[in-house]
Amino acid sequence: MFDDYERPINVNSESGREQQQHRPVNTPEIVKATPKVEDQQDATGGVLKFRVKLLSEGIGQSDMDVLCQIGLDGIRILEPATSRTLRIYSLENVTKLEVLDSYIFAFWAKTSVDNEAKRIRLKSNSYTTNNILDAVTTTSIQVPDEAIRKCTACGTNFNAFVQRHHCRNCGDIFCDKCTQGRTALTADEDAQPVRVCDSCMAEVTQRLSNAKAAVRVVVMLSHVDLAKKLQEEMDKKWKTSRAIAMIISCSIQITSFCNGLLSGTGVQSSMAAAIW
């Protein structure tokens, strides 16, 4: 059993009873507060179990407290009291993963009787939700725990004090010292940082940097195209306004010329009438 920081918790009921018998009568009992453990790991099979609430997806259904078990065989929904399997979803049938509001893990999957993938929502705290997301996304690529006895990077032997940790990018198994890196695996704004090994940390960082640089180039090119279009529109408007100004100027000149001709013809007519 492990705590929220993946440290082993050793519980020995017999030693606890012996200590309680040898404790002096007048000595007050010291009660140590420990955080609530939301996930459990099976050291032999690499199976993770999370205590979550299965949210209803239709009319007539109700939310229920369940255990979510994640392993190489898929995602199992278990009854908390008896660990009886209520539902099972193969990882091959999971089509989409998503975290909603940071405390709801949602995935879309279909069974043999479903024509389309259905949404399943599991509600917990943000820490457990991120752990479920990490476990599901890496279970299909990760190496089984029992297959590796040493850290892939430094060669340290795994034991009760040196735990196995999967890199969320390559899926290999490392010790805690060799998986200190935390980074998102995609450039999406809502991508959550996950545990990666030192080698993948450099590779993913470079990959995300290249992706961001490509986005900046696309944005820059789009700005250049926009500037060109604006300039073309301004040139068209300037040419149109210049043509209109020329037409107005010509019409004014023609009107003035016509008025001059009309006024000259009127004078000549009056002079001819007087002579006659």
Image (spheres, helix red, strand yellow):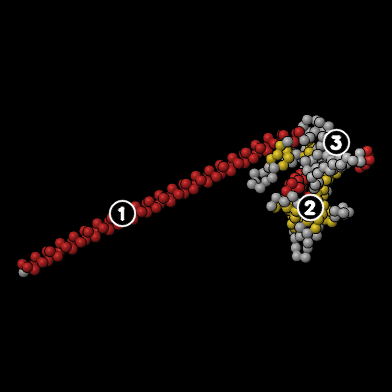
**Tag 2 near tag 1, CB within 8 Å:** no
Residue 10, horizontal then vertical, whole percent: 86, 40
Image location (x, y in percent) of residue 101: 69, 52
Residue 122 placement (x, y as % from top left)? 76, 54
Q: Are marks 3 and 1 in contact (CB under 8 Å)?
A: no
Residue 72 at least partly seen = no
Dot 2: within a 10 Å radius of its alpha carbon, few (fewer than 14), some, or many (20 or more) residues? many
Q: Amino acid at mark 3?
A: Ala
SS at mark 2?
A: strand
Relative to 262, does residue 186 appear above or below in the rendering? above
Crowding near pointer 3: few (<14 within 10 Å), some, many (20+)?
Answer: few
Dot 3 corresponds to which residue? 160
Q: Quadrant of residue 207?
A: top right
Q: Is label 1 in a helix, a strand or a loop?
A: helix
Q: CA distance from mark 3 to mark 1?
A: 91 Å
Viewport quadrant of the C terminus: bottom left
Which residue is disc 1 drawn over? Answer: 246
Q: Nearer the viewer, mark 3 or mark 1?
A: 3
Q: Nearer the viewer, residue 19 or 73?
A: 19
Badge nearest the viewer, 2 or 1: 2
The count of marks equals: 3
Which residue: 56% across, 42% down? 216
* Percent x, y of residue 154: 78, 30
Answer with mark 2 or mark 3, whichever residue precedes in sequence: 2
| In the foreground, 19 or 255 | 19
For the residue pair 13 and 194, the one nearer the viewer reads as 13
Badge number at residue 52: 2
Amino acid carrying label 2: it is Val
